[in-house]
């Protein structure tokens, strides 16, 4: 009996430890703030727009004898909402109303563009709360959701990317390097992951779950949501109509279907949005619902602001890869050399400014005739951005470091620097810091959602200009879209041995150097010692799958 109790206690303690570890991973794992910064740009724009609209009828909303008179608001707070519903408009004299409003516009504009983001985000939150509480009976969903999102943007580092703050930082780094006589090609900002960013993101996600759950459960108390007529009643109100939808009266089954689908979606959102197979569908349904609200009821600002928060449910590298794809379409990737004299203040300032506004790192600053530490000759017509002529690092993605241990003896002999990462976030950071890398990714033990994220966005977008070898299980190959890959992005089906991986690595380099002859990435020749020479000297084969029986599937 004692052994049984001891065993049960051990099992219970192990389960509690797993729960505690999962809790800590969920809330306290450092997260890159890129997605949060994109949300800041969108929410900042909506914040500025909201304050701008309030100013159209400033006296009608905020003067002492306005629609929401000061006496009525104070009586409401005293008897209903309590003494903590504060607004700085209570202490603003009427003759200073316009000046204070213009100051608020300036602060929210700084928040939108990311200038002094830490301070401007907190001040913008205070401004939104003050405007909402002063015009308490003129609020609606937009004022609430934009305030909620701004609150969480104050917690995370929402000004790290896509901001004036980042441009200032880039300018200072570039200017410092030029003055010290260093050539400048890329500007590294170091790791930007923080626990605060992850907490802000999780709170935003959790708040959305609460909003939809409360909305769904609240609708269940209405009879029209049970009989299926609620959607029709909303569309038939002439006051909100931007499109004449009365023709739906002839198709009651459709409005009833939309009514019940809305209830089912709102109630289930809190559970299904966390599941990899249903997350995208839940967000797609939500986007469709809010788009419909904007299109048919005219509430575009509320609808779009609700959709801004959906970005928090996607990993930062997914958002970055998506936007980088369009950035590469809009901006040229052809590199240009710029001669800079470290003795000329005007030349230093002009070159630093040019490098500051260089999102694709196409400008290479050559200071006093000394270029950055890589070969300058590039003869290919199309040279990808963020590429160096030779490989300086090997990055291995592996969930439990088995691949790392397998290749460690080989890599140690070559002298090629290497690093092993265990998550997609870490991989994204590694290639940002070492763009002259080659990647080996073992996805065998990753979750289905992580594999889909890697194959659907990271490999064809973020790793588009990187030679790579990806190891998959046969069941994971169903998510592979081969037509999106380059020939130097090699795929192997597990199980396979080290020689298979090294052979595909060599083929990836051959394909890469064939497509970009001016780049000529290579590793030391003895890196491939121990392989059959005929496999290295043979011409590259079309990309395929190396199976356990050495079968190649075209």
Image (spheres, rainbow, N blue to C red):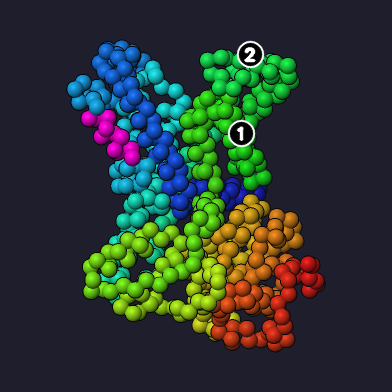
| Residue for badge 2 | 223
What is the secondary structure assignment of the residue under circle 1?
A: helix
Q: In the picture shown, does residue 383 fall above or below 89?
A: below
Task: Indicate whether residue 395 is drawn in magenta.
Answer: no
Which labelled disc corresponds to residue 288? Answer: 1
* Residue plotted at (39% across, 64% down): 188
Name the foreground residue: 537 vs 361: 361
* Residue plotted at (33% across, 13% down): 67
Name the foreground residue: 111 vs 361: 361
Name the foreground residue: 357 vs 338: 338
Task: Indicate whether residue 103 is drawn in magenta.
Answer: yes
Query: In the visual, does 548 lie left or right of 370?
Result: right
Quadrant occupied by the C terminus = bottom right
Q: Which residues are magenta?
A: 99-109
- Report x, y in % for residue 491: 69, 67
* Residue plotted at (45% across, 31% down): 145
Q: Earlier in the sequence, mark 2 or mark 1?
A: 2
């Amino acid at each position: 009996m004692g052994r049984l109790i001891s065993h049960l206690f051990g099992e219970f303690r192990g389960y509690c430890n797993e729960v505690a570890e999962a809790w800590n991973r969920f809330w306290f794992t450092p997260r890159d703030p890129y997605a949060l910064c994109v949300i800041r740009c969108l929410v900042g724009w909506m914040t500025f727009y909201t304050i701008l609209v309030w100013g159209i009828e400033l006296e009608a909303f905020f003067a002492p004898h306005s629609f929401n008179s000061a006496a009525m608001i104070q009586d409401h707070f005293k008897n209903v909402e309590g003494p903590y519903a504060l607004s700085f408009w209570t202490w603003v004299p009427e003759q200073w109303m316009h000046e204070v409003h213009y100051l608020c516009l300036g602060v929210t504009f700084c928040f939108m563009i990311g200038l002094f983001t830490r301070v401007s985000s907190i001040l913008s939150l205070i401004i939104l709360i003050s405007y909402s509480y002063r015009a308490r009976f003129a609020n609606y969903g937009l004022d609430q959701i934009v305030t909620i999102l701004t609150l969480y943007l104050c917690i995370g580092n929402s000004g790290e990317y896509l901001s004036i703050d980042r441009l200032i930082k880039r300018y200072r780094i570039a200017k410092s390097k030029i003055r010290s006589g260093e050539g400048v090609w890329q500007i590294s900002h170091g790791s930007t992951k923080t626990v605060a960013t992850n907490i802000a993101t999780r709170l935003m996600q959790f708040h959305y779950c609460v909003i939809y759950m409360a909305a769904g459960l609240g609708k269940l108390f209405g009879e029209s949501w049970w009989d299926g007529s609620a959607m029709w009643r909303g569309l038939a109100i002439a006051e909100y109509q931007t499109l004449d939808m009365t023709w739906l009266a002839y198709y009651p089954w459709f409005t009833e279907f939309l009514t019940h689908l809305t209830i089912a979606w709102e109630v289930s959102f809190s559970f299904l949005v966390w599941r990899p197979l249903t997350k995208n569908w839940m967000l797609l349904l939500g986007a469709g619902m809010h788009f419909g609200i904007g299109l048919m009821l005219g509430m575009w600002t509320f609808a779009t602001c609700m959709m801004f928060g959906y970005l928090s449910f996607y990993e930062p590298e997914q958002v970055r890869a998506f936007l980088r794809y369009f950035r590469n379409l809009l901006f040229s990737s052809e590199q240009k050399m710029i001669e800079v004299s470290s003795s000329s203040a005007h030349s230093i300032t002009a070159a630093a400014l040019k490098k500051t506004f260089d999102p694709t790192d196409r400008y290479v600053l050559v200071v006093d005739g000394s270029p950055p530490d890589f070969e300058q000759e590039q003869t290919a017509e199309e040279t990808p951005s963020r590429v160096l002529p030779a490989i300086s690092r090997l990055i291995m993605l592996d969930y439990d470091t088995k691949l790392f241990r397998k290749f460690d003896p080989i890599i140690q002999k070559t002298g090629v620097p290497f690093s092993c990462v265990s998550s997609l976030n870490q991989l994204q950071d590694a290639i940002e810091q070492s763009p002259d890398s080659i990647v080996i990714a073992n996805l065998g033990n990753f979750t289905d959602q992580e594999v889909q994220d890697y194959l659907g966005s990271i490999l064809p977008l973020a790793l588009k200009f990187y030679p790579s070898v990806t190891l998959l299980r046969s069941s994971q190959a169903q998510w592979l879209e081969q037509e999106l890959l380059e020939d130097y992005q090699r795929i192997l089906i597990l199980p396979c041995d080290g020689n298979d991986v090294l052979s595909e690595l060599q083929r990836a380099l051959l394909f890469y150097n064939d497509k970009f002859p001016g780049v000529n990435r290579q590793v030391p020749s003895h890196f491939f010692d121990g392989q059959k020479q005929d496999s290295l000297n043979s011409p590259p084969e079309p990309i395929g799958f190396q199976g356990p029986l050495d079968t190649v599937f075209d």
